Image: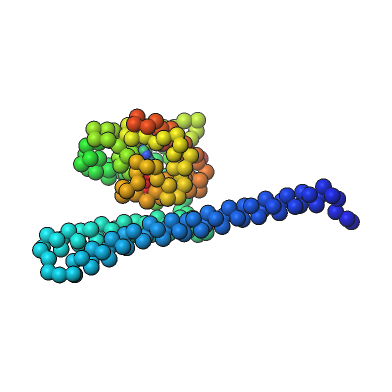
Amino acid sequence: MPIAKDEVGRLATTFNEMLDKLEAFIKKERQFSSDASHELRTPISIISAQAQQALAGKRGTNEYISSLKSILKESKKMSYIITQLLMLYRSDEGKYDLNFEPLDLNLITEEVVNEYKNISIEKGIGINFRMAGNIKIKADQTLITRLLINLIDNAINYNKKGGKVDVEILNENNMAKIIIEDNGVGISSEDIPYVFDRFYQADSARNGHGTGLGLSIVKWIVDVHKGDISVESEINKGTRFTVKLPLSV
Ligand SMILES: Nc1ncnc2c1ncn2[C@@H]1O[C@H](COP(=O)(O)OP(=O)(O)OP(=O)(O)O)[C@@H](O)[C@H]1O
Ligand SMILES: [Mg+2]
């Protein structure tokens, strides 16, 4: 039976859409590999420059110590980037081994907040935690811990001296709700749509310690748990991230 004209048209449109999607995907992949190698190249060049400088002639102990410190710092950064990239790579390939189990969200959050107590005191930032009674989720513990670390780490890093971070767990409409709020530097409305993109950093964060991968990992973790994440922010006022996760039934 001959194919009707409008059917050919529909087929052509479908093909075109498919090709557009494929092209966008390839572009994104290329961009990702080039960003990844750029991020890794910077610490490698610092490490080799520091080593060369230290070996160039006889130096004082302090200079050797300073070179070694910077080599250590950059190696740690590289190891962080590689770990995060590996996690994203596995997630893209659908190869990440998820291990869903019943978890007490209050307990996990409290542990992460406690881990950050000293760091936040050192930075002159207060951190508070408010929990709700008995919130159980069915989730991967490693990933939920990573989600909390990445969000709390941002709330502390993009803060100001004397600032605060409020972490709250709620049970709302049969969803577990995690709110992480800070009164730090904030994110501009131009930057907000891109903060979950890989390697994206707002101007205020460039030249800092991060690589722009933290929130893209958070987004992936929320997605595999069939949850939802939203962000509200005002420049110089602060930022609030809200994560919703299904409660365990
Ligand atoms: N709480 C926050 N307050 C202000 N800006 C934020 C906050 N959280 C994220 N951002 C902005 O969003 C960008 C992306 O965050 P993300 O966590 O993905 O990357 P990063 O912190 O720069 O690096 P990484 O987390 O990989 O170490 C940050 O660079 C920063 O500009
Ligand atoms: Mg971060």
Q: Which residue occupies 32% across, 34% down?
A: 184
Q: Position of residue 223 (x, y in %)?
A: 51, 46
Q: Position of residue 182 (x, y in %)?
A: 33, 34
Observer able to see residue 14: yes
Who is closer to the viewer here, 72 or 45? 45
Residue 185 higher or lower than 33, as above or below:
above
Q: Position of residue 113 (x, y in %)?
A: 30, 41
Q: Quadrant of residue 73?
A: bottom left
Residue 141 higher or lower than 230, as above or below:
below
Query: Is 149 situated left or right of 52 in this image?
Result: right
Query: Is 3 situated left or right of 154 in this image?
Result: right
Observer able to see residue 108: no
Who is closer to the viewer here, 221 or 36? 36
Q: Which residue occupies 37% across, 34% down?
A: 186
Query: Is 224 situated left or right of 205 in this image?
Result: right
Q: Quadrant of the N terminus?
A: bottom right
Q: Which residue occupies 78% across, 49% down?
A: 9
Residue 178 higher or lower than 209, as above or below:
above
Residue projecting furthest to the left: 60
Q: Which residue occupies 34% across, 59% down?
A: 42
